[in-house]
Image: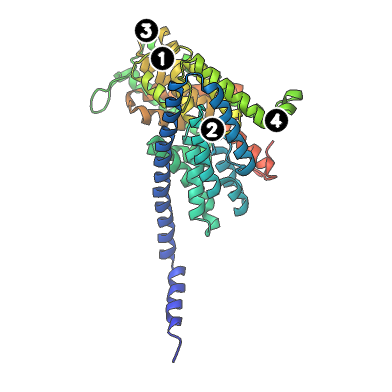
């Protein structure tokens, strides 16, 4: 008798080699990955809220506890990261950008492995439960990329595309903004749409939109929308938002890059020798920022941004102190993102300066400063504009939002020549002894 298994094996071989099966498997991989990333993003959102609630309950019971809890949490998170989970530091977006440029799958795994993804979730929650001013959106990008890297570990030639898809899906699910995820993947993660081209496209859209609005008035195609800005003195809020948001965002990014490179002189050597002490000092300063701001700067800042947009009052020091607390949380070395805190900083700055524009609602000014500051930090105007417009669902403000995104990015570049994520990614590649996508060793 012949071997009955041979026909079955031949069928499997032919089926596996079939172009149709290859296409189906590839599409299935991306679809399954999207579902997994979505579930992970939802889980991270729920857990992050629980961690912040836990900190708030403890803080309400013992108002001075942040002076002990926050430094201790920062120290523990930094120790665990440096000792066991190197690569989980910061937001995680620079790690994914760097991983996409690596050729070796093993090297990629050092930046986007499942181990790091799980550690990222746990350490992010530890930071939020300790009062860190951190966001979950950046970490969701690294977690999403790690999930896609695991699913595509056999097909190494598809890993860059899988990492890109996981990153975009992470942003889309974290912000509940699908279009923002697509734009983020194109503009920030892949840079396949040249930055200069994106600026030109945005400028062209603005020019056409303003021309139409100047001639026909501020109208919507199928009816009126609330929150619009008529031409007049109220538009002075736009250049002010560009200047303030771009300048503050650029300075924030420059500070993070400075600490990533290492401070010069004795201060730099001291920080390098005592990273845990540095984390503790950063935690203590964050706690002080919290006490000075009536406990508003702790956490992601989502709740505070929502209150400002709804017209509620907020301590005047919230915006500036949220900026400082986010910078301290970032340079401490703990895992945590800067997207949500950046939006909160922008909302706070807008709230403080809203009295300068009496004819414009506070919520509208806050939206303009949110997109301006976020653009100043990440220098990705399309992504920033789409994220804010999708999150606020106020499409009547789309033109001033785009102007703020473009203007703030230009101002930020005067202070910091490169966006924070790509600057940090270049330093990661240099640390690994790799070259960037242009074939040059990053400086």
Which sits in the foreground, 435 or 56? 56
Q: The C terminus appears in which quarter of the rendering? A: top right
269 versus 150 height, above or below: above
Q: CA distance from mark 4 to mark 3?
A: 49 Å
Q: CA distance from mark 3 to mark 2?
A: 36 Å
Q: CA distance from mark 4 to mark 2?
A: 41 Å
Q: CA distance from mark 1 to mark 4?
A: 37 Å
Q: Residues within 10 Å of mark 2 (few under 14, many from 20)?
A: few
What secondary structure is marked by label 4? Answer: loop
In the image, which is nearer the foreground, mark 3 or mark 1? Answer: 1
Which sits in the foreground, 147 or 249? 147
Q: Disc 1 designates what residue? A: 314
Q: Residues within 10 Å of mark 4 (few under 14, many from 20)?
A: few
Q: The N terminus appears in which quarter of the rendering? A: bottom left
What secondary structure is marked by label 3? Answer: loop
What secondary structure is marked by label 1? Answer: loop
Whether residues under marks 1 and 4 lie with C-beta atoms below 8 angstroms apart, the answer is no
Q: Earlier in the sequence, mark 3 or mark 2?
A: 2
- Residue lying at 76% horizontally and 24% vertically, measured from the top left: 266
In the picture, measured across the screen, residue 82 lies left or right of residue 249, that is right
- Residue lying at 44% horizontally and 13% vertically, measured from the top left: 315
In the image, which is nearer the foreground, mark 4 or mark 3? Answer: 4
Tell me, for residue 196, which label it has, or none: 2
Q: Give the image quarter of residue 42.
A: top left
Q: Earlier in the sequence, mark 2 or mark 1?
A: 2
Tell me, for residue 358, which label it has, or none: 3
- Residue lying at 58% horizontally and 20% vertically, measured from the top left: 285
């Amino acid at each position: 008798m012949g071997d009955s298994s041979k026909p079955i094996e031949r069928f499997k071989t032919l089926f596996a080699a079939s172009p149709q099966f290859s296409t189906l498997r590839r599409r299935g991989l991306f679809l399954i990955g999207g579902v997994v990333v979505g579930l992970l993003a939802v889980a991270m959102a729920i857990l992050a809220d629980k961690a912040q609630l836990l900190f708030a309950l403890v803080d309400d019971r013992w108002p001075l506890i942040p002076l002990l809890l926050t430094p201790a949490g920062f120290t523990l998170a930094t120790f665990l990261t440096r000792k066991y989970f190197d690569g989980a530091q910061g937001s995680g977006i620079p790690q994914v950008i760097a991983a996409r440029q690596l050729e070796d799958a093993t090297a990629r795994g050092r930046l986007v492995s499942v181990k790091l993804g799980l550690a990222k979730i746990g350490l992010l929650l530890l930071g939020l439960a300790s009062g860190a001013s951190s966001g979950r959106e950046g970490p969701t990008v690294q977690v999403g990329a790690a999930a896609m890297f695991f699913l595509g570990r056999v097909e190494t030639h598809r890993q860059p595309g899988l990492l890109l898809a996981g990153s975009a899906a992470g942003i889309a699910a974290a912000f509940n903004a699908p279009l923002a995820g697509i734009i983020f993947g194109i503009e920030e993660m892949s840079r396949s749409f040249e930055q200069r081209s994106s600026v030109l496209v945005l400028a062209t859209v603005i020019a056409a939109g303003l021309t139409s609005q100047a001639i026909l008035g501020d109208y919507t195609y199928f009816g009126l929308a609330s929150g619009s800005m008529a031409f007049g003195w109220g538009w002075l809020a736009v250049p002010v938002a560009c200047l303030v948001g771009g300048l503050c965002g650029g300075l924030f990014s420059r500070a993070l890059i400075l600490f990533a490179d290492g401070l010069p002189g004795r201060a730099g050597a001291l920080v390098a020798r005592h990273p845990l002490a540095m984390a503790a000092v950063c935690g203590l300063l964050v706690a002080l920022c919290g006490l000075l701001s009536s406990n508003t700067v702790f956490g992601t800042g989502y709740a505070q941004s929502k209150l400002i947009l709804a017209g509620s009052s907020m301590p005047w020091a919230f915006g500036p102190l949220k900026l400082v607390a986010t910078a301290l949380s970032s340079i401490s070395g703990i895992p945590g993102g800067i997207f949500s805190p950046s939006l909160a900083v922008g909302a706070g700055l807008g709230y403080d300066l809203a009295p300068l524009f009496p004819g414009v609602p506070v919520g509208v000014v806050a939206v303009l400063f949110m997109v301006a500051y976020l653009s100043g930090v990440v220098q990705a105007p399309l992504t920033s504009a789409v994220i804010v417009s999708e999150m606020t669902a106020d499409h009547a403000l789309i033109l001033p939002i785009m102007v703020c995104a473009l203007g703030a990015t230009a101002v930020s570049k005067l202070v910091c020549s490169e966006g924070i994520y790509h600057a940090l990614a270049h330093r990661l590649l240099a640390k690994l002894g790799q070259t960037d996508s242009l074939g040059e060793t990053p400086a």
